[in-house]
Amino acid sequence: MKIHLNKNNCPNYEKIKYILNESPDLMCRTLEVGGDCLEVIFMKNLIKHEFLNEYVIKYIQQLPIEYITFSYLLKNIPMDEVKTNFDEQEVISSLLNGFVYIYLSVESKAFMVNCTNPIERSIEKAETESLVYGPKISFTESLTSNIKIIRQNLKDSNLCTDELEIGERAKKQVRIIYIKDIADDDILKTLKERFEKIKTDDISDSSVLAQCLEDNHYSFFPQFILTELPDRFLYSILNGRIGVLIDRSPVAIIGPANFLSFFESTEDIYLRWSLSTFIRFIRLFAMVGSLLITAFYVATITYHFELIPSKLLLIIGQSRSQVPFPPLLEALLLELLIELLREAGARLPSKVGQTMGIVGGIVIGQATVEAGLTSNILIIIVAFSALGAFMAPIYEMGTAIRVARFPFIILAGVWGLNGIIIGVCVLMVHLLKLTSLNKPYLAPLYPLRIEDLKYFLIRLPHHFYMRRPTVNRPLNAIRTRWKSKKTEKDLDEF
Amino acid sequence: MKKWFILLSSLLCTACMPPDKILERQGISTIIGYDLLDEDTYKGTISLLQFDRKEEKTSVTISAVGTTSKQIRQRLEQRTSHDITSGQLRTILFDKDMTEMLGIASFLDTMQRDTSIGSLIFLAITNNAEDTINNNNYEEFPDMGSYIYQLLDKHERKEMLIDSNLHDFFSSLYEFGIDPTLPIIANKKGVAPYINSVALFKDDKMVGSISLKKTLFIKLFTKRDAFLGDITFNIPVEVLEKKGVTLVEKIKGDKFNITIRPIKYRGKIEFSKEEAVNLNANISVSTIELQPAVTFNNKESIKKLEEILEEELNKELGDILEVFRKLEIDPIGIGRKIKSIRKYSNTNEEDLREKYSRLKFKPNITIEIKRTGAVD
């Protein structure tokens, strides 16, 4: 087929049709203008037809012939986003983004107008990170509305939303969001360098993007916070972190993250400080417990019965007496059973899922104990550790703990408490070595930043939060000046 | 990564694991008792926890005869399908005859060297260890071992007993200048075993015993802030009258009974001149019960009452010291005090004992009634 190219480098219908592999969606509406014709080319599924009909076709049709020139149309067409000066590639990608291509064959010039009709779901309540207190709004799949949410919540002229495109085949828009006079330039530079290094044809979701950006790809632990809550996102941005949003994903990436920040939830800020501190300690306790308690059970029952208090000894001994498996096998069996239930519950439709919970929790649990396959003490322990893993407000951290539990159980079964200690040492070394965007992962704990502990480990009353956490190296460390607050008078003061 | 893999597989592939001690396969002994049969044969009795829920009893007792504690253990092993372990061992009981005739240090030495036995286990003496362990009258405890452990632990926590664990026993046994003591557990038909009195040791042999109440005098001088326990006096009315203690009303009976509770005390052994030892102690007390309930007239009466109580206590202390001297033992640690004086610091054990027998004791306890409480 002969491909016609004109001097302005604007492809015509034939050419576009060829590039798009004769897509049945590609439409060309030819308008008669005097003796000549004007081609309106678009992808029929991607555009909003009312816009096209009302403001493009109707507008052009009612214009007197002498006005239908490239320059006049470009200036006067009643559409907000108009493009000129593009190359062939851009024409194609814009068409695929829902633009309408208007080609004037007389002048062999063309321009494009935006008639996009993106698929959008309405803004809903957060699903994976539900809160009792505080705003319930969550991000959606549309980047535009996500940006809208952020802008509406934070009306700061220094809020930057740098645009990038990644993915070689399926190009996706990415926005790096930060506050210019707070976020550290080094971190920003590191992040941008990481983006340059990503070579992939497609990034399907922000969680994939986060994995590509990570410092250590082999680690169990997530090195970026993934959240669907705009308030959490903004809280982090305001404390000097950098956020990343990717089109078509309702989950935002926040970095640099540190270990303790996976155990904070925005709810901690909304609740009173005393309760939040308590809850944070509970979460950390649950995390450690979830990681080690089954292993500890296996170790003590197999090697160190001396450690069990004498009153407990009889109870555990009685429940173990009929079990035919060694403790290691017993624990692995039950842990796998719980994981099985969890996975099945997550995949099934919600109505069936509930039944699964009952079947799994009551029937299987009860039956295994009655059949003498496991001890009921272990059922309690495994249930606790399963529950503990879900205490982490960030889902990814919970999964990391769930997976990390198994090596500990095996170590405990092989070397007893020594094994657990070895495991804890390896884990500690790993966590100490780990970085997120080149910032230490265990940050406020090591290197120790005492003034930051109030952000990550405990909560204090609000007037203690005058400075931003130093681990994020904020350019502007001061949030509020306490002095100005002090001069405020009480209601009864004169 | 590779290094880790090699390290891990070199340990796993060679089956480098500690020997496993799975809970339900262990015969967990909580108490062990030794009885003297003949001159050199002993009978060892242990109580093992048993985990079978179908059985009503939660423990089994087995005995075996042997000449050493390890032989006894070996023979005990023959009688059970479980591995006998001593990781949960809490108490060792010794038969009275054995303690009096042979001494227990040789038995304890092997216990001390066993890594699975902690040095905080309790030691006690009883008339017949096997019978005591076989006694079924233990309240809610799974077996006799836990019962006796709780019994001794409670008494030690409440400071009604002088320390009686393995470590304390050894430290006072090997230190010269102080002699060890251990509780004696009485075992009567139909009742749970209870602590009866305290055995006095010379080296590792039991030579006598004193009542629990009298351990007060030992605690007074060996411990800093023990709970001395309430002290009850029965004072004849004549003594009161002779002293001139005036009461608001007349007492009808012929005895005046008073219980005091020490609040604070300070005991000090003072080595005044050659061969004379002052045992000074100052006890602040509150009166907690008076039978019959009467009111003291004035401060002076209280002062006089204090004097009466002091006399009583000093007399008792004097008596007990005489008993100690007669038995040639020193549980209070006067010898230790002597040794702490520089010029005697090189004294050897024999000289010290010899010196101890020549000492003149001068008990000097003062009582101060700080509070008379509601009685006032």
Image (cartoon, grey):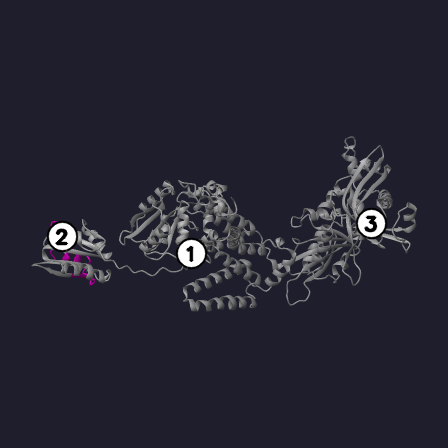
What's the chain of the residue with tag 3?
B
Q: Position of residue A365 (x, y in %)?
A: 53, 66
Q: Position of residue B368 (x, y in %)?
A: 81, 43
Q: Secondary structure at mark 1?
A: loop
Q: Are marks 2 and 3 on the same chain?
A: no
Report the magenta residues as a range: A1-28
> What SS does tag 3 mark?
strand
Query: Which residue position holds label 2?
Result: A70
Residue A372: x, y in percent? 56, 66
Please tell me how crowded label 1 is: few (under 14), some (14-19), or many (20+) other residues with Cα within 10 Å. Answer: some
The residue mark sitting in front, 3 or 1, is 1
Residue A470 placement, left or right of B142: left
Cβ–Cβ under 8 Å for marks 3 and 1: no
Q: How many marks?
A: 3
Furthest residue in direction top, as rendered? B343
Question: Can you say whether B350 is above or below A317 in the image?
Answer: above
Disc 1 designates what residue? Answer: A135
Residue type highlighted by circle 3: Ser
Q: CA distance from mark 3 to mark 1?
A: 76 Å
Mark identifier at residue B209? 3
Name above or below for residue B306 compared with residue A323: above
